[in-house]
Image (cartoon, rainbow, N blue to C red):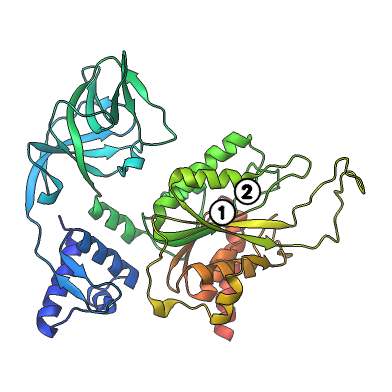
Amino acid sequence: MLTKKQKKVLEYIESYTQKHGFSPSHDEIRKHLKLSSVSTVNHYMKILQEKGYIKRGKNIARSVEVDKKESIISIPFKGYIAAGMPIEAVEEFETISVPSGLVSVGEHFALGIKGNSMIDEGIFDGDTVIIRKQNSVEDGETAVALINDNEVTLKKIFREKNRIRLQPANPNLKPFYVKEVIIQGKVISTFRNLEEKEKKDEKFKFNQFLCGDVLDMMKKIPDSSIHFAVTSPPYNVGKDYDNHNDKMKHQDYLDWLYKVWEETKRVLVPGGRFAINIAPTGIRDFVAIHHDYIEQMKKLGMKFRTEILWYKQTMLKRTAWGSFKSPANPHIVPSWEYVLIFTKDQDRLDGDPKMADITKEEFMQFSDGFWKIKPETQRKGHPAPFPEDLIYRLMKFYSYKGNNVLDMFGGTGTVAVIAERTGRNFVHIDISPQYCKVASDRLENEKLQKKLL
């Protein structure tokens, strides 16, 4: 099923190819359809390719071929079902059109998904699932289950000795158990509501400051729209942030951040990179929170690519020696921080090679994982600002010009400033109006300096 915009892209490719004998470039498509960027064109091209409407030659310009369209069929849409706790039983009230390739032999119906309990099965809030009617499933298969006579839910089904386990596909959620269950059908395919996604994409603007709670603000960002995320979250060590409690219970802190990481994975494109700057905390009571972050990311399915050691200071002002000149209880003072690098789904970040703006000298320098960079001294009211050189290196090494970058704990705006300086688009999030104001002022000053050059 094609949306109106997808259909326009396909029709332009067809008409251009018939006229010229070869397919249009991404930029020609962008200009003709007045799309915002080449990356938007690439988004539509990937959808058309996944749906079987076009074929593309790998790394070859103007190599798009229009393929045969897949036939469309209509099936009943029976409302919405909870991929979470059970909700009331659904009833058929309309039909929807779907590609024939999403169904198999037998009778089928569709359901809209509410909730995120099945995300590890690739079923997300707002998706539509295709169900084949059947009254039994194998253990571990995902099914529509009717329980308590009038409640339905979507879960993986496991039969145990004296009960039936309804298992979410989300590591943060626990299963629940029933004595009896009526299977109404098995999930055989899933598809995104792309038209709704495109409406959301159209409303969202990059190069903006979002001031508010990080989880609320991140929900505004479209799926698969960020190429590079970089941040240094609060370390939970009692720093004097504006509008943030930096002394939570450790598990509460980790639970909160896990939700932020989930949203980060959602907004990253396939191959998108996520750089987290973090240091081990405490000297007397050492807390290796960088290990916690790595475990959280692995749990989310993000690939841990590398770690960069940022050596940030000399030992000239050292005071915490522990047992000075004695092996009784000496202290090691962390004079470094880590930058942990993760990727989503794949190693490679797709992009136009012409938009790679890192120089040979920079690449050779930055690919050495020991970075000696002085910490920021002009704090602008923030207790732990990024040094500009750190962000510059990360942004040039891990993203292309024109890419979208995100800092969900944006502070006083170093990521936004470096994005402006290097020709990227940014999203800055921070809960503090004071920090957002400082960040906005810094960006305006950066723009002014560029005009004066």
The reply to whether residue 379 is in sight is yes
Please state which of residues 222 and 105 is positioned toward the viewer in this rendering. Answer: 105
Badge 1 amino acid: Phe
The disc, 1 or 2, on the residue closer to the chain's N-terminal end is: 2
Q: Is the C-beta separation of discs 1 and 2 under 8 Å?
A: yes
Q: Is residue 331 left or right of residue 10?
A: right
Quarter of the rendering occupied by the C terminus: bottom right
Does dot 1 land on a helix, a strand or a loop? loop
Please state which of residues 302 and 439 is positioned toward the viewer in this rendering. Answer: 302
Quarter of the rendering occupied by the N terminus: bottom left
Image quadrant assignment for residue 361? bottom right
In the rendered image, residue 251, in percent from the top left (x then y), is placed at 59, 34
Image quadrant assignment for residue 338? bottom right
Badge 2 amino acid: Pro
Badge 1: how crowded within 10 Å, few (<14), some, or many (20+)? many
The residue tagged 1 is: 409
The residue tagged 2 is: 234
Q: Is residue 283 left or right of residue 399?
A: right
Compared to 442, does 338 lie above or below? Answer: above
The reply to whether residue 220 is in sight is no
